[in-house]
Image: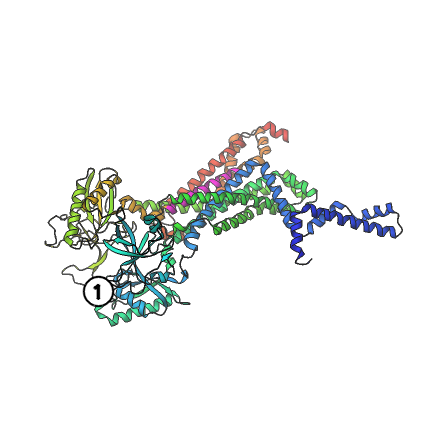
Amino acid sequence: MSLFFRPRRLFSNLFHGEHAERELDEEISAHLTMLIDEKVDAGMSAEDARRATRIDFGGVDQVKEQVRDIRLGATIEQVWLDARYAVRMLRKNPGFTAIVVITLALGIGVNTAIFRLVDGILLRPLPYEHPDRLVRLIQSQRQLGLDTWNLSQASFAALRDNTHSLEAVAAYANNGANFTGEGEPERVSVGNVTADFFTVLGVPPVLGRTFRAGEDTPGNNGVCVISFGFWQRRFAGNPNIIGRSLNLNSAATEVVGVMPAGFSFPRPETEIWIPLALNPTRPAPYFLRGIARLGPGISPSEAETETTAVLWDYARQHPDISESRIPLDRGSALKTIITPLKQVMVGATQKPLLILLCAVGLVLLIACANVANLLLARATSRVREIAVRFALGATPSRIARQLLTESLVLAFIGAAGGVMLAWLGVRMLGRMPVDGIPRIEVVTVDGRVLAFTAGLGLLTGMLFGLMPALRAYRMGMVAAMHEGGRGGTSSRRSNSALVAAQFALSFVLLIGAGLLLKSLQRLESVDLGFNPEKLLTMFVYLPARKYSKPEQSLQFYQGLIDRMRGLPGVRAAGLTTSIPFGGDDNTDNFIVEGHEPGTGDEGVQAQLLAMTPGNLEAMGIPLLRGRDFLESDRSDAQPVAIVDETLIVGVVGGIKQDAHAEKLQPHVYAPLAQSPTLLAKLVIRTEGLPNSTIGAVRTAVSGLDPDIPVYSIRSMDEVIGRTLNTQRLTNLLLTSFSLLALLLAAVGIYGTMSLYVGSRKNEFGIRLALGAQPGVLLRLVLREGMLLIAAGIAIGVGGALVLTRAMASLLFEVSPTDPGVFTGVTLLLVLVALAACFVPARRASRVDPMIALRCE
């Protein structure tokens, strides 16, 4: 048949079956007529010729079946018939179908949900041009204890102008600005960037333009680009926004462009980009982070080698840089660090997500084992049907294909349910505290996720359907009758092996969840060095144009503190330049008078911050020696400082600055009056709920200056909680998956023990008739169940030891082989198994001996 006619014939066979059958009847009739005519021509009578032809030709229906089996599209047609038959069989057993579909929907649903996270966060490329060539560029001064350190304006300019391995280089700094003049004042997140920033990322604006060369120099940076979300939220998508002037920090700034929806680099909350006023000759401070696009074929290590050499050359040419905070011409460990941008953005979440992906994979295996158990039990009850089908001429492969098709139908129905559960799961995820989890906003359902789910449905159908199909393939009619007659011994062995595997996998999951739970409890119980309860925090920024003199800002802050202390329900209030876990720490070196460092030693590093009197009381930091700051500690008075016990003998208690797991860092506190600042953090200790004072605080600030917004208003518990969001979410999901796996395993052993009791029902009845005590039978069944659990736990211990080795870096003050966790999980599994086995065991001890004897 030509290639032109094959598709037409296939279409006709599949969708016009009646026409194909008529053609087949006509063809067979014509063939019979031709054979009869040949025999008549050979001298036979017409009646003898017809009879002989029928005998030679064979049964017409059998010939039709043979033709149907080999004609084009026959396999597709048979699969379709198998699927229709499978649907009919499943509709006749709604209880069985519902249990299997729910089990599969849970297994496939959790896998789809986690895959959506893994795909959105780890697998999808960044939404920039050639994202695989984008890198972050910073430096390292390990001799000074600085594994990572930002760039200065001078070092950035040197790298930008003297490297050939980098196709384009830009720099940015996270900042903020007070947006006023358009209703309520608002603090917006700002990215201060160099002119090539958008060129490096390769993202064009949807309106207007990005920055031009020269707009990142002092005096020429009065323009800005805004985000799509900010454009819609504050200006309702006004198409005439280009050229409009915004009041940012009391300075007029012209809008020259609008970025597309979804673009928010370097921070998810960034809404405005302003050009840096770049001074290439300034060796300090170190506040810039570089991004670059590697040249074609250039690796990060090759670029590191060249850029490190550029830094060294620049340091040797500018020896005066050694007077800056971090000297570029000293320290053999000076080097640049170039890291793929995607790794920087998602690196911290990679291991937790991969652990969760492995966890849901184990849940799916448990679900498949559970469904395979159910199918084996159902196949045992269908052995008579299978034997009859063998007797009617069905081949083992035909029976196996039918059973496998039923499994695939179940799997795809379960996959459809899994997609719905995954959709609900991701919606619920959006209501959880997911701040700090990168790229969470791009997690969605699309063709990739649906393709994954379809493939997962096919895989699961093959996994749990293969065992019943192989059993059907290996058995013939006699074997099927024999299997049914002896109660399915081989089926029980298969069920027992699957149950042991389920409990082994459940043990592994529960060990992982237990270790993470204990680690999280240890983290949450760490002594932070201050009291976060009933503590409200917020930020206040004073624009430099309006508060150009230190006296102005100090007057504002003093008035603010006075108003805060006068509010009802406020126990204490203070201002500081840095709050714990706020991500705004300021590390610097200092030298103790009389203890000058030697050559190459830059002194001691500590957290430096300023605060008002009363801030220690508001924070709940204990004063161990000396005194708190006084109102008299002004700029014209003797400079004073407070140090913590980590630094020297100690005057105040040490506090955790950035993370629960970090070592205590030295802190040096100075009076805010002697170290004035424009950006301050207000902390308020309240009698009741912290959020109850927010309205009064806004009113107080507005009364002092209506153009000053109060922002980042959070209780200290919320601030601290944000640092644990990834751990809490990972722990919640892993614990949920582990409990789901345990539930499935419990159902599996319940079903297996029920099958075990059912297959030996007559035997138990005879034993009772001969005088056996019910308790003996109950213990017999429980012992069988415990043997399965013991086998599963023994296998699970080995798997758990492998898993915990991979999890070691995620644990805090918890051993990967913690005996308490291993013992607790073992006891939990034993108790669950005993509960699941008790009902079948009790049923075995109550078998009516008369029914058993009557059956015999």
Looking at the image, what colour scheme do you see?
rainbow
Pick the front one: 654 or 687: 687
Q: Which residue is labeled 1 in the image?
A: 324
Q: Is residue 616 visible?
A: no
Tell me where residue 134 appears, x and y as whole percent: 38, 62
Q: Which residues are magenta?
A: 729-751
**Majority secondary structure in the magenta region:** helix
Tell me where residue 239 appears, x and y as whole percent: 36, 53
**Residue 357 horizontal side relative to residue 153, left or right:** right
761 over 357 or under it: above or below: above
Per the image, label 1 sits on a secondary structure element best described as loop
Tell me where residue 640 appears, x and y as whole percent: 13, 53
Pick the front one: 185 or 282: 185
Confirm whether the magenta stretch covers residue 341: no
* Residue displayed at 63% across by 28% down: 854
Q: Is residue 466 visible?
A: yes
Tell me where residue 166 appears, x and y as whole percent: 36, 67
**Residue 496 horizontal side relative to residue 156, left or right:** right
Pick the front one: 57 or 754: 57
